[in-house]
Amino acid sequence: MNDKMNTQIDIEALYNQYSGMVFRRCFKILQNDASAMDVMQDVFVKLIDKQSNIQDSGLSSLLYQMATNLSLNIIAKQKVRSDYISNNPVHNEDEIDQTSDIESQAMDESLLLKYLQHFDVNTCEVAIYHYIDGYTLDEVAKIKKISNSTVRRLLSQMRQTLNHLFKVGDKK
């Protein structure tokens, strides 16, 4: 019983130490206070559920990754529930300067976050690590435990899809 209580105290200490970081990560991806708060709490609930499998080293990295994954899961769920792709134009002319380069527009942080719902969670995570967090392709590959070529392929597919979405939006 004491071991369980000590673990609970450790989780509470982790919450006190890292909840701000986790919230900021969730908010950066979700762009919504309430959703970010919900996901932040979910991160720590999952941490409690899996506490017997967790090691003391690298906890901030684990929490950061959990926050990223759970936030992206929220976006994926919104994608499934939404008929946004089929019924609405991807953008209006005010959002994107038609004379500038499509790829640089797509990689703008706010636009990237807006269009995450069009991609699978794995691609979103790679894009966030690379374009928003500023990790190199090598660093993203190590974080995700995938090859550099897979990282490049996912980012290339994302750029192609965004180019297509922007062109379809221009026709509407």
Image (cartoon, rainbow, N blue to C red):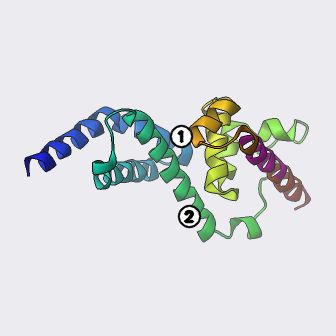
Q: Quadrant of residue 22?
A: top left
Which residue occupies 31% across, 35% down?
A: 56
CA distance for labels 2 and 1: 18 Å
Name the residue carrying label 2: 77
Q: Nearer the viewer, residue 32 or 140?
A: 140
Which residue occupies 27% across, 50% down?
A: 52
Q: Which quadrant is home to the C terminus?
A: bottom right
Q: In this orientation, does residue 94 appear? A: no
* Disc marking residue 139: none
Whether residue 18 sits left or right of residue 62 in the image: it is left
Look at the image and say whether residue 57 sits in the magenta stretch.
Answer: no
Whether residue 144 sits left or right of residue 44 in the image: it is right
Q: Earlier in the sequence, mark 2 or mark 1?
A: 1
**Residue furthest toward the left?**
2
Which residue occupies 62% across, 40% down?
A: 128
Classify 10 Å Cα crowding around label 2: few (below 14), some (14-19), many (20 and above): few
Q: In this orientation, does residue 116 appear? A: yes
**Residue 122: percent from left, percent from top:** 63, 52
**Residue 139: percent from left, percent from top:** 62, 31
* Disc marking residue 28: 1
Q: Nearer the viewer, residue 23 or 57?
A: 57
Which residue occupies 63% across, 64% down?
A: 79
Q: Which residues are magenta?
A: 151-160
Q: Amino acid at mark 1?
A: Lys
Whether residue 164 sits left or right of residue 72 in the image: it is right
- Determine whether the residue tagged by mark 2 lies in a helix, strand or loop: helix
Q: Amino acid at mark 2?
A: Lys
**Residue 6: percent from left, percent from top:** 14, 42
